[in-house]
Amino acid sequence: MKICLFGAGAVGGFMAANLLRAGRHEVSLVARGAHLEAIRTRGLTLRTAHDSFTVRPHAATDAPRTLPQQDLVIVTLKAQAQPAAAADIAALLAPAP
């Protein structure tokens, strides 16, 4: 299954790291700025009180239309950012079978 986390901040990054660690799906991230560069160069690291691990997404981009269509898009943007991203989110969704 192709899964995109649209907004890879704290919540999206947490979800993506755990999905990637499970290793069952192709996970891509949409992020921006320094956070995107850090993911591209060092991967995505999750640190908790009991664990720490680093994973690498299938793709990390600030241009969501460069990704293939996805089976699932999880939107973790702040509410005020969602209207501007709606067309990019819709373009990622694969047509229903």
Image (cartoon, rainbow, N blue to C red):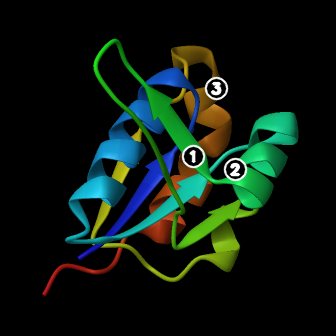
> Are the residues at dot 2 and dot 1 in contact (C-beta closer than 8 Å)?
yes
Eyeballing the image, is 43 above or below 60? Answer: above
**Horizontal and vertical percent for residue 52?**
42, 33
Count neighbours of disc 1 (C-alpha within 10 A) and say few if under 14, some if 14 to 19, many if 20 or more. Answer: many
| Three-letter code, disc 1 | Leu
| Three-letter code, disc 3 | Ala
Q: Nearer the viewer, residue 81 or 68?
A: 68
Q: Name which of mark 1 and mark 3 comes first in the sequence.
A: 1
Q: Nearer the viewer, residue 10 or 6?
A: 10
The answer to which image quadrant residue 61 occupies is bottom right
Eyeballing the image, is 13 above or below 50? Answer: below
Count neighbours of disc 2 (C-alpha within 10 A) and say few if under 14, some if 14 to 19, many if 20 or more. Answer: many
What residue is pinned by disc 1? 44
| Three-letter code, disc 2 | Ile
> Are the residues at dot 3 and dot 2 in contact (C-beta closer than 8 Å)?
no
The Cα atoms of the two marked residues, 3 and 2, are separated by 21 Å
Instruction: Single out the mark in the foreground, 3 or 2.
Output: 2
What residue is pinned by disc 3? 81
**Horizontal and vertical percent for residue 11?**
43, 25
How many numbered callouts? Answer: 3
**Horizontal and vertical percent for residue 69?**
44, 79
**Horizontal and vertical percent for residue 10?**
52, 22
Q: Is residue 56 left or right of residue 14?
A: right
Secondary structure under tag 2 reads helix
Instruction: Single out the mark in the foreground, 1 or 3.
Output: 1
Q: Name which of mark 2 and mark 1 comes first in the sequence.
A: 2
Eyeballing the image, is 11 above or below 94? Answer: above
The Cα atoms of the two marked residues, 1 and 3, are separated by 22 Å
Secondary structure under tag 3 reads helix
